[in-house]
Image (cartoon, rainbow, N blue to C red):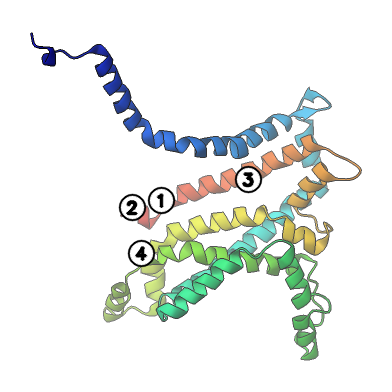
Amino acid sequence: MSSSAVTHPSNASNKSIVAWIKKMKPAIWLTPLALFFYLFQLAPMIWVFINSFIYEDEYSFENYQEIFDSSFMIQGFSNSLWLSIWSSLIGLMIATLLVSSLRRIDSKLRDGVIAFTNMSSNFSGVPLAFAFIIILGVNGAFTLLLKQYGLIDDFNLYGKWGLLSLYIYFQIPLAVLLLYPAFDALSDDWQAASALLGAKTWQYWTKIALPVLFPALLGTFIILIANAIGAYASVYALTNGNYNVITVRIASLVSGDLFLEPNLAAAISVILMAILAFITTVNQWLIARSYHAKR
């Protein structure tokens, strides 16, 4: 038998190793992301979940019992959900109208608006709160102008309506960026065809456009709720922690000067994650039953 016909065992082993590496190459490239996700997402969540059941160095449900027995904590959840849901709805409606208009204007102007939207979506935290104080504060420029013309008698930027306007502001740019690609699913020919068949504009939107856009609208709505319910810096900078939202309560329990209760803060965080998980599950269920999924 010739030597060329003999396959050395080590060569076969090396080839199998090389083939395995090529096969696993995508997974190997994902390793840094997986490590990052574990260290900064899974590990903190596991820590929070475990510590939420620790009360005076013993495992119990006392932290959760304390939350549900406290009207102050319930009010914090209620205020956060109220601000999140309403700001998400209003922001989504405004963004939908804006994106629909952007699809029909000159490309240069459209690119400029998208660039400005991208920039304003990153304008948040303390600078955003300061800007709102200058514009809509007690002696803000816009507030004084409206009072001068008798359009408003009183406007409290530091109450729930003022906070709602703040939330709506930072919801709109995010909603625009999320919805803009979704409108590529709509064809201009559809509206022209529906018009030829006698459909009015509102019928086109209710019967054709919105059912097609429904998954994107619903998914954007859920992301906006998560974005709003987790807001902290802008709210704290604007109200100095005097308005009761749940993120401020969590922060006061882990960084307060008098009482530190990280386990209670962990329990609040678990409830917050459960609420978001429930909303996301409902969102996925509705998307699965939507017009787009049945096509």
- In the rendered structure, find residue 174 and report the number of the disc placed on it: none
Return the disc, 3 or 4, that comes first in the chain's sequence: 4
Query: Residue 212, located in which quarter of the rendered image?
Result: bottom left
Return the disc, 1 or 3, that comes first in the chain's sequence: 3
Near-viewer residue (144 or 68): 144
Secondary element at tag 1: loop
- Camera sees residue 54: yes
Q: How far apart are marks 1 and 4 (CA)?
A: 18 Å
Q: Which amino acid does label 4 sit on?
A: Ala
- Camera sees residue 97: no
Q: Which residue is drawn at 57% across and 35% down?
A: 38
Secondary element at tag 3: helix
> Mark 3 highlights which residue?
275
> Mark 1 highlights which residue?
289
Near-viewer residue (201 or 105): 105
Q: Dot 1 surroundings within 10 Å: few (below 14), some, or many (20 or more)?
A: few
Residue 46, position as x, y percentages in the image? 64, 32
> Mark 2 highlights which residue?
294
Do the numbered discs 3 and 4 sit on residues whose CB atoms are within 8 Å? no
Q: Dot 4 surroundings within 10 Å: few (below 14), some, or many (20 or more)?
A: few
Q: Which residue occupies the extreme top position in the image? A: 1
Return the disc, 2 or 1, that comes first in the chain's sequence: 1
Do the numbered discs 2 and 1 sit on residues whose CB atoms are within 8 Å? yes
Q: How far apart are marks 2 and 3 (CA)?
A: 28 Å
